[in-house]
């Protein structure tokens, strides 16, 4: 199953040393390339450190809510913009091992967009956001046009995607940016979807490639049966039973791989958080070229913070932190129906969303004073924990020998 | 007239379901079938009038028998009665299944046409494989669950342990009490012994989820979620102990290896693969076109 694991760089991307290094890594032996969600500054730094320490390629994937262009106010991760993110990464990535990626760029994906934002404005801002990414030196752009606040013709998201794809490619050529693309317009679901929708998209891209000269996408996002809820992966990939009316993963995946390979692209699985090693270890053999993990790292950092706070006599600060995180209600999207989660659980799922909040910075300053740590010492401790989590994934994906 | 098929229905406290199944089979397939009903720990007042075996010892009354031990008991009874060899096929089904019409004759037709098929199952009415297979057809598979399987007796003869009791044989591994994974194991035994497992769209099965979810008290199992957890926990423990597998995926890939090998040995049957052969081909030997630069370095 899934022996078509070779990563072939499309036109334009093969001049990019970071993408070339990642492809070389992918093609050396069966491994799955990891995308690390930019959920906090410590996660960014931890990922860069792991890449240097183990001399491995990995991808940093930033959504618009996490990192966005300056004109859209940055994102929730320390207000970083594409430029400040790439500057920070490149200044530390001496081995050219960190591929900086836009994750889920597209209309209505930014925090400044709402349901009231017109399609024209949402598309224009998406374009501006992508151009800022290119200007900042991002290596890969994921174009995701699945968000449509109002009901629309099912063909419209595909047309929007094609439009943005061409615009971004033209901009990349004009600016001599060696960039790759990722496409996928499906929202995460716990089940394996049919192949028709991604096939139509890839077919349309292949036609454009003929007529417009745009390159094939490096990755396509298609549901493989992963879904993150709370601190679990509730998708069918790891489910021990058949899910009614869904094609079993062991049938769906080979079909999917055959289709993706036929179009000269590669599979990127999203929502790979919280899968056990036994499942992750199968990803390279299943032929899953790349897989994204995001909130698991944020939660790991939150747990690290709570460990310091509660382990060193600052439980009151832990309470303040948890209350702040809970009050964001960002946990709502992660909660399972009928969940028996506690408010503490909910706050933990949402902890990383407040790391840049002034109230959290005040809590953190109090913590440092109370436990006699420097800011650097605390960050090193937190990164140590994140790095251990990342290393587990890299070993399971067979990027780092274990 | 000799009846070719021994139907073994496994039930616990579901006399109406058994009656319905028996009526259906007799209506369409009377001439070709003998029906045996194993009552696995059923209460006396819930016994089907069709029952032929009643497992009523204390442990069975308390816990039931579950699929592996239940079907083993039915087969054991045929062996003990000297009747196993009279049949060409064994049709092992749970009392909770429904069929959409004549099922035995349709499966028999396909088994006659496919002598290398050792196990055949009707496709579930909600299983998406139905679209891949197409109407009134079949494909060889490695991954399906046991709801209603017809077994070719020559395949059974190949793997049967004539000395095995319901607990440890003769066909299923009854040491895995709640039986999670024993169906995959039987499929693997088939491919190892050159017998394929087929999924048929010539007929269709459905299972009444209400019977399993809301009538747990009737079947006298634990509540659905509790039972499911026990099923998986015990099954994974069994897989780990017996094979060293720690996930279902590993077990299925193991089955897949034998499945692929079957088509190496029987290339003329490749058209009956569920997935085309190129889905399991080796690494792409060349990039799709010259615009791509293929970067390849030797492995370690």
Image: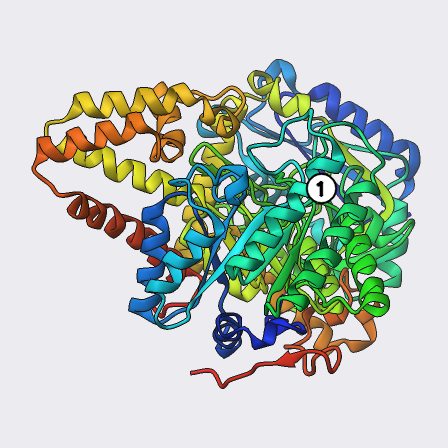
Residue B228 x, y percent position in the rendering = 51, 32
Of the pair A371 and B143, the residue shown nearer to us: A371
Q: Is the image coloured rainbow, by chain, by secondary structure, or in one colour?
A: rainbow
Quarter of the figure that contains the N terminus of chain A:
bottom right
Residue B34 x, y percent position in the rendering = 80, 40
Of the pair B93 and A56, the residue shown nearer to us: A56
Residue positioned 39% across, 54% down in the render: B241
Side of B25 relative to A30 (left or right): right
* Crowd class of label 1 (few under 14; some 14 to 19; many from 20; radius 10 Å): many
Of the pair A347 and B63, the residue shown nearer to us: A347
Of the pair A180 and A280, the residue shown nearer to us: A180
Quarter of the figure that contains the C terminus of chain A:
bottom left
Residue positioned 67% across, 67% down in the render: A174
- Residue where numbered disc 1 is placed: A123
Q: Answer above or below: position of A96 versus A136.
A: below
Q: Residue furthest left?
A: A372
> Does the rendering let one see residue A126?
yes
Side of A260 relative to B234 (left or right): right
Residue positioned 90% across, 54% down in the render: B109
Q: Quadrant of residue A328?
A: top left
Residue A208 x, y percent position in the rendering = 82, 62
Q: Residue furthest top?
A: B45
The answer for which chain carries disc 1 is: A
Q: Secondary structure at mark 1?
A: helix
Side of B161 relative to A306 (left or right): right
Residue positioned 72% across, 52% down in the render: A164
Q: Answer above or below: position of A244 versus B256.
A: above
């Amino acid at each position: 199953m899934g022996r078509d694991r070779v990563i072939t760089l499309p036109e334009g991307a093969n001049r990019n040393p970071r993408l070339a290094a990642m492809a070389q890594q992918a093609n050396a032996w069966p491994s799955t390339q990891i995308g690390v969600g930019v959920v906090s500054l410590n996660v960014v730094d931890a990922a860069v450190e792991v890449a240097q320490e183990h001399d491995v390629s990995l991808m940093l994937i930033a959504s618009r809510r996490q990192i966005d262009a300056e004109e859209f106010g940055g994102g929730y991760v320390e207000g970083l913009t594409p430029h400040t993110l790439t500057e920070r990464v490149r200044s530390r990535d001496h081995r050219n091992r960190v591929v900086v990626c836009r994750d889920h760029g597209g209309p209505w994906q930014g925090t400044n967009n709402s349901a009231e934002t017109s399609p024209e404005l949402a598309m224009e801002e998406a374009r501006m956001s992508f151009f800022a990414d290119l200007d900042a030196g991002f290596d890969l752009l994921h174009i995701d046009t699945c968000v449509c606040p109002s009901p629309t013709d099912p063909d419209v998201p595909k047309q929007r995607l094609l439009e943005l794809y061409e615009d971004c490619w033209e901009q990349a050529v004009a600016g001599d940016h060696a960039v790759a693309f990722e496409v996928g317009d499906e929202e995460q679901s716990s089940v394996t979807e049919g192949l028709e929708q991604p096939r139509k998209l890839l077919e349309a891209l292949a036609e454009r490639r003929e007529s417009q000269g745009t390159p094939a996408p490096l990755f396509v996002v298609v549901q493989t049966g992963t879904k993150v809820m709370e601190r679990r992966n509730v998708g069918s990939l790891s489910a021990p039973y058949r899910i009614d009316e869904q094609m079993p993963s062991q049938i769906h995946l080979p079909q999917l791989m055959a289709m993706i390979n036929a179009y000269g692209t590669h599979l990127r699985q999203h929502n790979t958080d919280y899968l056990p090693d036994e499942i992750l270890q199968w990803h390279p053999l299943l032929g899953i070229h790349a897989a994204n993990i995001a909130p698991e790292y944020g939660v790991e950092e939150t747990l690290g913070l709570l460990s310091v706070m509660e382990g060193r006599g600052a439980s009151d600060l832990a309470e303040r932190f948890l209350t702040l995180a809970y009050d964001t209600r960002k946990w709502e999207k992660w909660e399972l129906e009928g969940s028996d989660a506690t408010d503490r659980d909910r706050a933990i799922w949402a902890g990383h969303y407040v790391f840049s909040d002034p109230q959290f910075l005040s809590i953190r300053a109090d913590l440092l004073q109370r436990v006699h740590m420097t800011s650097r010492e605390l960050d090193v401790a937190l990164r140590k924990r994140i790095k251990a989590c990342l290393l587990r994934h890299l070993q399971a994906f067979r990027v780092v020998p274990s | 007239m000799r009846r070719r098929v021994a139907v073994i229905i496994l039930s616990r406290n579901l006399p109406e379901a058994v009656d319905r199944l028996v009526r259906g089979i007799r209506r369409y397939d009377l001439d070709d079938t003998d029906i045996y009903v194993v009552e696995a720990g059923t209460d006396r007042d819930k016994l089907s009038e069709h029952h032929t075996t009643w497992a009523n010892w204390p442990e069975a009354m308390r816990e039931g028998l579950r699929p592996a031990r239940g079907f083993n008991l039915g087969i054991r009874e045929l062996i003990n009665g000297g009747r196993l060899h009279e049949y060409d096929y064994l049709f092992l089904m749970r009392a909770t299944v429904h069929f959409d019409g004549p099922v035995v004759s349709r499966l028999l037709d396909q088994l006659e046409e496919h002598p290398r098929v050792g196990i055949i199952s009707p496709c579930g009415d909600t299983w998406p494989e139905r679209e891949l297979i197409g109407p009134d057809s079949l494909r060889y598979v490695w991954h399906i669950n046991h709801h209603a399987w017809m077994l070719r007796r020559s395949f059974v003869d190949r793997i049967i342990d004539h000395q095995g009791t319901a607990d440890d044989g003769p066909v299923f591994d009854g040491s895995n009490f709640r039986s999670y994974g024993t169906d995959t194991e039987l499929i693997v035994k088939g491919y190892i012994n050159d017998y394929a497992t087929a999924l048929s769209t010539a007929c269709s099965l459905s299972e009444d989820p209400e019977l399993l979810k809301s009538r747990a008290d009737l079947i006298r199992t634990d509540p659905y979620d509790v039972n499911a957890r026990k099923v998986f926990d015990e099954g994974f423990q069994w897989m780990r102990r017996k094979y060293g597998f720690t996930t279902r995926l590993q077990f299925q890939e193991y089955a897949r290896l034998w499945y692929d090998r079957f088509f190496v040995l029987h290339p003329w049957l490749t058209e009956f693969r569920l997935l085309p052969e190129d889905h399991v081909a080796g690494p792409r030997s060349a990039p799709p076109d010259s615009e791509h630069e293929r970067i390849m370095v030797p492995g370690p």
